[in-house]
Amino acid sequence: MSDMAHEPPDFKDMGEEELWDLISDSRHAICLGVRPCMLIPYLRQARVLSDLDEDEILTCLKFTNRSMRTSHMLDLLRIQGRNGAVALLEGLMIHYPTLYTQVTGRTPSTEPSHFSGLIKYSELTEYLVRVVTGMQKELQAERNGAAQLRSQCCSLQTELSRITKQLEDQKSLQMEHTRLRKSHTDIHRDLLKLKDEKCDLYVRYAAAVEEKSEVNIRCRDLNLQVYQLQCELRKAQTESDFQRTRSMRRASTSETQQLHEEILTLRRQLQQAENITPACQDILAQDLEEAKDRRTELAEELRRLQDENEALTRERSELLEKKDCFTLQVQKLTLDCEMYQQKSSVFQNQFGELKAERDRAYLARDEAQAQIACSLAEKDTLRAQLVDLQEEIFTLRAQKTQRDPEQCSDRSLNWDSGREMSCDTPLSSPMRRPRLRRMNALPPGCSNSFEFNKQYSDDGFNSARSSLVEPPCSDSLRRRGTDPEFSDHSLEICDESFCMLTLESDFEFLCQDEDEGKTLVCPDSPDTPGMSRASAPPFLMRSRPQAVRITSRALTLSFQGEALLSQLQVIGGNKTGVFVSNVSEGSPAQSVGLRPGAQILEVKFQKEQRALRMHLEDSTMEEALWALGQVNGPCSLSLRPKQDAYQNLLQQLKNNEVTSGDSFYVRVNMSLPGGGAGMLSVTCNDILHVTDSHYGSVGYWWASKVHDSQLMDLKSGRVPNFYRAQRQLIRAIEDLSFQHQAPRRVERAQVKKKAVRIVSTARQGRNPLWVSVEEDNNTNSQSDDGKPSSVSLMPYTLVTPHHPPVCRPVLLLPTILRGILDKRLAEQLGYQMCEPETLSAAEHSARMQKGEVLEECEPNTHRCYTVQGVEKIMKHGTHCILPLGLDCVRRLHRAEIFPIIIFVASSERSARKFKHKLRQNLITENQLLECSWSEEPLLDKLPCLYRTVHPDSWNDSATLLDNLQNIVQEEQRKIVWVEPDLW
């Protein structure tokens, strides 16, 4: 009874303030020991927390740890009053019984009577069952985890014993290593001592050798001096003997007395000199002191000179070292110069040999042209004979028909002989000859034919224009080469496969090209002047393989291109060019001299009564095969011989260095999911390096993803080609248009990854992504077979890489945040705001014409932002902050300046984070959202990539500023990919 008396009162009987005082007393323990995710389901069941509260507690980035989230949950429950406190205590009683006892002082119980009426009995039972089930699962999981931990502990103990044993072995090895290292150190020390002793011995030996050499020199000098002294001594002895003898002979008393007087005088002077006075001594002492001072000065001067001498010696040694270095460099440069001279001589020799080979080739070409001219003349003669024979045959058949009219109704005329030599055109009856359709000559650029009205006299009729049966003379051949009307360019005519007959006209004039002279065909023979046009027999046109036209190293071959891809095979691509790799035997392409190794520049042909020209100089392999596949009749190919490039391509293909001659970079404008069969998964705005546009099956490219900072290929695979991807893009846009957009949730803004970038173009110029097709009136068109008539939607966009050498300017979007973010970013180190300039009227007009004005501050003023202002800041190694709009991007690109474009995406939640800053600038949150949503679609029309800052990646302005600086540093290291102007 005493225990019951001291038990605390039930919390159901307590008031709101008492309950929250009870909870506040244990708030610290609750914040440390409670996990919000455990209590929130019960609190949601008790309807004291909403889903928004749950989202805010669990996902808010402001709460960095569990205690902060628990504390915020308590604050939200406090708002609910007594129900919040009761629900919290009941949740603690279920999930944290120990903490419940610590808070309330009561023993937890799961009886229904101990719960309040916040939750119905059935719902409470279900919740308790779920909790018990969850606890059982957790208990089972904990048991399984304990078993795993036990097994892991056993394995770790085994591993620990093994490691311990290995550690002991390692310690023994370490001790052995230490001992060996110590012995090695001792031996090394002894070796150093021996080396020092050896050096000392060398020094002593060198000193001894020097001393010996000095002693030998001194000995030699002394011997020389001794010899000199001996000579002087002998001389002095001889002289003294002579003087003695002389004095003995001539000595007299007067002389002796005089000598004694001189001796006495000298002795007196000596005594006077010895008796020095004190004054003289002082003078001598003073002189001695002065001499000592002078000696000290001389010693200092000598020391100074010695120091200068040492410095000069050191400088001399340094200069000698530099001299040695320069001498070595001179020797190296001399060797390099000699090597370059040898290379130059070798190159000159090779150049001379190539020049000689070129001259020989020119001579061989001239000979071949002369032979060709001879053969052409012979063919002309034979064709003239054939025409005469055909006319005679027709005349004879007509006469026979007139003599036998009754036989004409029973049978039809058979012209087998004429058909064997002409164009296989059967005639059913001489009375009803079919009117043959006149065909245009090659190439299809020629539109009209005209008649030959020139009259020839007997004197002016030469073999160059003759149809007589006689070989051409040398003058005729020379006239064929000099006369422009009958040069190699004008004598080009069609192949035998498309020669024709006509009954209504004479021979036609066949035009070769728009820029060339027209080809003339001879009229009917002068031997049959009386034959009328209606009764004129059908005759053959001159037909021989098309001659070669050489213009600036480009050749034009015209021939019958029926099923052109069956006559020749091509390799290459847009990087190397498209080359002929194989020509079928006996095909018209081979008959006109088409050989492997020639680069195809363009193809001309006629289709659906339109003369088309397709440029293949920089087209891909896929487009080249499509263009050549469109040819199904007479065609004209423009070729350029490039054997070196062709052989190089063959060698690369043989060594598996490349798979084709294609190489170009594209920006993907849609997401393409990967799959089987080597398909590459790409997302929108990825950069791909396409290296084979005709890989495997038709309709796929082989491409690789590109490294962000280097021109290096990463993962490779197949992707759909331009037209297949264009169809997928159209389907994706249709799917997006029929999808119903879900309403935006106010509580959570989700930024989805872009799946489609809609880019269209109105420019149909030369591009590796499609072949350039032109009509003869120079208007662009597109064929109907398999290709769209106009390219508008672009699944891939051609891009070119750029490496900016200096700091790139920064453009922040949306523009409504310009006053908030630009100033904060400009305050950071390495960033500077771009300032406007005030220009004069003339300078403003000149810069506007040059496109150097980026944006004007106010209309009708000359205060504006210029390219020069941006470049001035960039030269200092500083990022220029551009307070401009999107219109300045293309102007900066024209000036080779590539800004970093950063778009700060906004949601309703992120807009609240700018609430204080927006109020200072008199901007509402709705205006920010509308500006962001309106400017985001404009980013897809930019010719370069941009970065997006998602709303969930930052908490406050400081975090956003750090993210912006990190993005700028990342983008500065990346390659800038720029699209061409599509409009």
Image: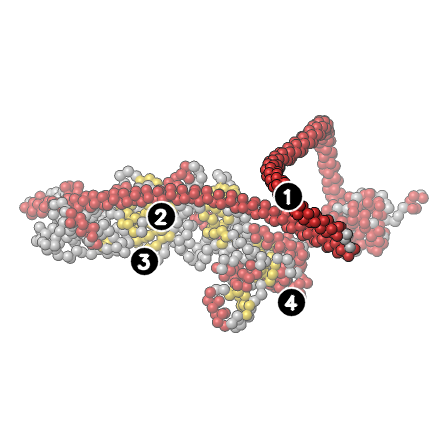
| Residue for badge 4 | 922
Q: Write the residue at 47% across / 49% down.
A: 665
User: As rendered, which of 897 and 125 lies closer to the eye?
Assistant: 897
Q: Position of residue 606 (x, y in %)?
A: 29, 51
Determine whether the residue tagged by mark 2 lies in a helix, strand or loop. Answer: helix
Three-letter residue code for mark 3: Asn
Mark 2 Cα within 10 Å, few/some/many (few <14, many 20+)? many
Of the image marks 2 and 1, the number of the one nearer the N terminus: 1
Q: Earlier in the sequence, mark 3 or mark 4?
A: 3
N-terminal of the pair, mark 3 or mark 2, is 2
Residue position for label 1: 251
Distance from disc 2 to disc 1, alpha carbons, whole Å, reads 145 Å
Image quarter in which the C terminus is found? bottom left
Question: Is residue 761 shown left or right of residue 66?
Answer: left
**Disc 3 versus disc 1: distance between alpha carbons?**
148 Å
For label 2, the residue is 627
Q: CA distance from mark 3 to mark 4?
A: 60 Å
Label 1 crowd bin: few (<14), some (14–19), many (20+), radius 10 Å: few
- Residue 653: x and y, percent? 41, 39
Quarter of the rendering containing residue 532: bottom left
Name the side, left or right, on which 156 lies relative to 502. right
**Disc on res. 777:** 3
Taking the image as drawn, is residue 562 in sight? no
Front residue of 675 and 513? 513
Is residue 587 at all visible to an observer of this figure?
A: yes
Question: Does label 4 or label 2 sit earlier along the sequence?
Answer: 2
Between disc 2 and disc 1, the foreground one is 1
- How far apart marks 4 and 1 lie (CA) works out to 143 Å
Disc 1 is placed on an element classified as loop
Name the residue at 80% across, 45% down. 93
